[in-house]
Image (spheres, rainbow, N blue to C red):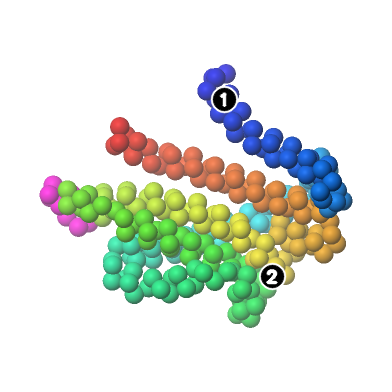
Amino acid sequence: MDGAFVRRFALGLLPWVGAILLWYAVRWSGLVNPSLIPAPHQVAAKFFELLTRENLLLDIYTSTRRVFFGVMLGIAAAVPVGFLLGWYRSARTFADPMINFFRALPPIALIPLVIVYFGVDELAKLVILFYASFFAGVIVMYEGVSQIAPIYIRVAQTLGANQFEIFRKVIIPLTVPHILTALRVALGVAWATLVASELIAAQRGLGAMIQNASTYFLLDVIYVGIICIGLIALIMDLILRKVSARLLVWQDRALG
């Protein structure tokens, strides 16, 4: 096995080991009532119990599906809007105050209105996740596009490229990194918003599981839900990073 890989693996594992040790240390320190902090092995046991007896996989699938569709729809709308705002200064001047106004509104504050207008079914949850993903993506897109150096356009014009060729061969490749960054940011925001979206009469899902567990003070179940959300978000981000590295390999070649 490659020594560099072993070192990277050890460095990546070390923070997790440190977090678990700190978890045990806080529990055993006496600073906090041990009954309020379930031990890591207790949380692990509850995880396997929920996995084998309580359809935890269904909750994971339900939440992941909601986040996936909410983010895809949000980014599909955010990319053209963010591009227009970033590319055209007049559009940015016109829409920037309103974009930042809505971006500052927490999705949980909109839940009563979402229930009134969209009911309590899946559509309402998707609207909340779409809202969070859209505004996160728009900000990343227009900030990135607005910083594209004009020199690339001038070089393409000097070489005789027409407007369509400039857009296809220069603008789109330069925009792809910002689209991928917007997607990563939106994924993080959507997972952070998941519990709020599943406040809307959700029967299944990790957020619903956490809400139900809080009602009965089932702290170990709450810990399982929180850890599952974090791990799934981490896995999705790692996959997206791998995809980004493959799609953007031309940047390394250009810089090399």
- Residue situated furthest bottom in the rendering: 116
Q: Which mark is residue 20?
A: none
- Residue at 81 percent across and 40 percent down: it is 41
Horizontal side of 41 relative to 229 (left or right) equals right
Q: Earlier in the sequence, mark 2 or mark 1?
A: 1
Q: Which amino acid does label 1 sit on?
A: Arg
SS of the residue under disc 1:
helix
- Residue at 48 percent across and 61 percent down: it is 136
Local crowd size for mark 2, using a 10 Å CA cut-off: few (<14), some (14–19), many (≥20): many
Specify whether residue 207 is in view.
Answer: yes
Horizontal side of 160 relative to 208 (left or right) equals left
Q: Mark 1 points at which residue?
A: 7
Placement of the C terminus among the 4 image quadrants: top left
Q: How far apart are marks 2 and 1 (CA)?
A: 45 Å
Residue 29 coordinates in the image, percent (x, y): 82, 43
SS of the residue under disc 2:
loop
Residue 11 coordinates in the image, percent (x, y): 59, 31
Q: What residue type is labelled 2?
A: Ile
- Residue at 66 percent across and 51 percent down: it is 229
Magenta region? 156-164
Residue 56 coordinates in the image, percent (x, y): 76, 51
Nearer to me, 8 or 24: 24
Mark nearer the viewer, 2 or 1: 1
Q: Is residue 203 magenta?
A: no
Horizontal side of 160 relative to 238 (left or right) equals left
Q: Mark 2 points at which residue?
A: 200
